[in-house]
Image (cartoon, rainbow, N blue to C red):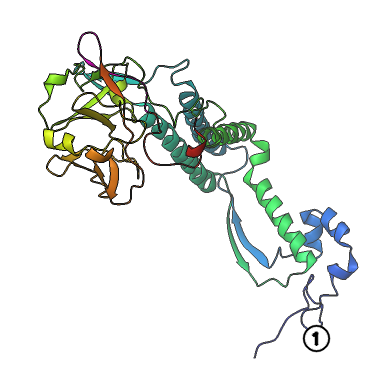
Amino acid sequence: MTTNDHSRPGSGGGDDEPGQLHGGPDDDYTPEQLAAMDRTELDRLGARYDGVEVLHVEPAAPAGSPLEKKNTRLVTNWFLLAALFALAFVVIYAGSGWFLPDWEWTVESETWSSIYTPLLGLTFGASMISVGIGLVLYVKKLLPHETAVQDKHDGSHFDRVTTGATLMSGLHNSGLPRRKALKGALGLLGAAFGAMLLAPLGGFIKDPNKGNPLGTTPWAEGLRLLRDDGTPVRPGDQTPGSLATVFPEVEGGNKAYDAAVMLIRLRPEQLETLVTPEGQEDFGYGDYVAYSKICTHAGCPVSLYEQETSRILCPCHQSQFDVTKGAMPIFGPATRSLPQLPITVDDEGYFVAVSDFREPVGPSYWNMGRLG
């Protein structure tokens, strides 16, 4: 046989109608009086802390003992280490290219590699791991180990107040209020960890969007077209129907994500069917045309060229562009033509750019129509 017991303090006090709560401390004291009581006073009124009855409490280590001090130092050191890694993340993120180097090195005098992003990942991951280890050690070595049972609460104000008292009692039992070094480490960790999370999201340390980064590239008037090995290109260097990938003659030009250009020499039969978009009649030079290598759909490299069909293909999503029609998309998800780079030759007979691209390179974006 099962009965409902409403006789304990904070319950319905023997009420025969469930749902109404009266009798016991809830009727004997106002909510303000209950909220002002400490745990000892609530205990005398029969508090069980939201139905939780503690059967056994075993401290992790005696207060003030050498073992407790050793455990406190261990936990504090892990939180300090997490804070230092978080601060290192912020310093690397904010200082790269400013008061810190560009985190690059050369391999075989040609290939450049950057460790900027790996350093960010390393410091961020190390901070997260250190926080995790610190929390685990804090629970295992500093918090008391309790054995408790819990009944389903009845929702009285008395039980809600005693729940808060339970939380405050747990904080007191953890010893955190008297561990100044640990509190300092946690404060530093909170500040450093917050800065680490906000730095890349808020963009308040440095602004990567100064100027018009989406509408400009490293190309400019007079810059030579260079192969990946740094050699310039003359009109006679390519055979009809061939394609060469070229970059601007600037430092790091072959590493700029938006600077890769396809220099294509058309065949005679392609020249006969060549349709030049309005306003771009003088963009090519002789039988040469130059188009951005960045697909206007999702930014993939469109490096496949079928000279028989005059089609440039993107291997990612199968967009196809007709080189004899201003690199207009004729198949696939791309909706814009590949931007054309206006080219000519300099006094020494090498290909140079007449200007930057006249339209943005790569996928479309929200404010492309507002570009001047």
Query: In this view of the protein, can residue 73 be seen by the observer?
Result: no
Residue found at the very far left of the displayed protein: 239
The amino acid marked with disc number 1 is Asp
Asked if the stretch drawn in magenta spans residue 105, the answer is no
Question: In percent of the image, x 51 and y 48: which residue is there?
Answer: 140
**Residue 205, image x, y percentages:** 55, 26
Q: Is residue 52 above or below residue 76?
A: below
Residue 116 seen in the figure: yes
Dominant SS type (magenta): loop
Q: Quadrant of residue 30?
A: bottom right
Tell me where residue 12 appears, x and y as whole percent: 80, 77
Query: Which residue is rendered at x = 59% and y = 36% of the image?
Result: 190
Q: Position of residue 283 (x, y in %)?
A: 30, 26
* Image quarter (top left, top right, bottom left or bottom right) of the N terminus: bottom right
Q: Which residue is depicted at the point 86% across and 61% down?
A: 31
Q: Quadrant of residue 186?
A: top right
Question: What span is colored magenta in the figure?
Answer: 346-357
Q: Please determine whether, in this image, residue 130 is positioned above or below residue 335.
A: above
Q: Which residue sits furthest bottom?
A: 1
Decide if residue 257 is on the left or right side of residue 30. left
In the displayed structure, does residue 370 sit left or right of residue 5? left
Residue at the image position 21 percent from the left and 17 percent from the top: 230
Where is mark 1, residue-wise? 16
Residue at the top extreme, as displayed: 347
